[in-house]
Image: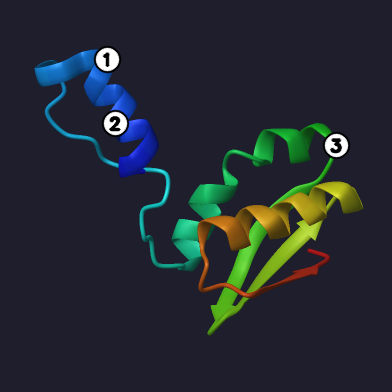
Amino acid sequence: MKMGIERVLKEKFGDALKEICQVDQQNIHATVVSVNSHLDMLRPAIHNYGGSVEVDSIEGEICHVKYNGPDQIGVGIKAAIKDKFPEITKVVLSNS
């Protein structure tokens, strides 16, 4: 980040810019609560299709999710979890 975005921000805002923090890639540990919280952004779309999603458990690198809904959204759920929580290497969807 320092080479591109930070440099441009400092050029544009100068001394008015005190600190730059990358908040998107914070290292948040994968727990049932944190993964469910992350899935809150997808829940409205899932509910619009008559579906539901809830993290059931996390066992090591595997996240077990109860999910009902379209397959395409299920693929998005898996990607969203693995992108936010790199320690999760496999997401298992099961019917709730």
86 relative position to 17: left or right: right
Residue 77, given in percent of the width and then of the height, sits at 71, 53
Q: Nearer the viewer, mark 3 or mark 2?
A: 2
**Crowd band around label 1 with a 10 angstrom C-alpha radius: few (<14), some (14–19), many (20+):** few
Tag 1: amino acid: Lys
Q: Secondary structure at mark 2?
A: helix
Q: Quadrant of the C terminus?
A: bottom right
Q: Is residue 40 left or right of residue 21?
A: right
Residue nearest the observer in this picture, 92 or 50: 92
Give the Cα separation between the discs numbered 3 and 1.
44 Å
Between the residue at mark 3 and the residue at mark 2, the CA separation in whole angstroms equals 43 Å
Dot 2 surroundings within 10 Å: few (below 14), some, or many (20 or more)?
A: few
Q: In the figure, is residue 4 to the left or right of 13? A: right
- The spot of residue 76 in percent (x, y) is 75, 50
Question: x%, y% of residue 9?
Answer: 29, 24
**Residue named by callout 1:** 12
**Residue positioned 49% across, 50% down in the render:** 37
Residue depicted at 51% across the width and 73% down the height: 87
Q: Given the image, on which type of amino acid does mark 3 rest? A: Tyr
Residue at the spot x=36%, y=43% of the render?
Answer: 1
The disc label shown at residue 7, or none? 2
Going from the N terminus, do you reach mark 3 or mark 1 first? 1
Q: Which residue carries the number 3 mark? A: 49
Residue 28: horizontal and vertical position, in percent? 38, 60
Quick one: SS at disc 3?
Answer: loop
Q: Nearer the viewer, mark 3 or mark 1?
A: 1
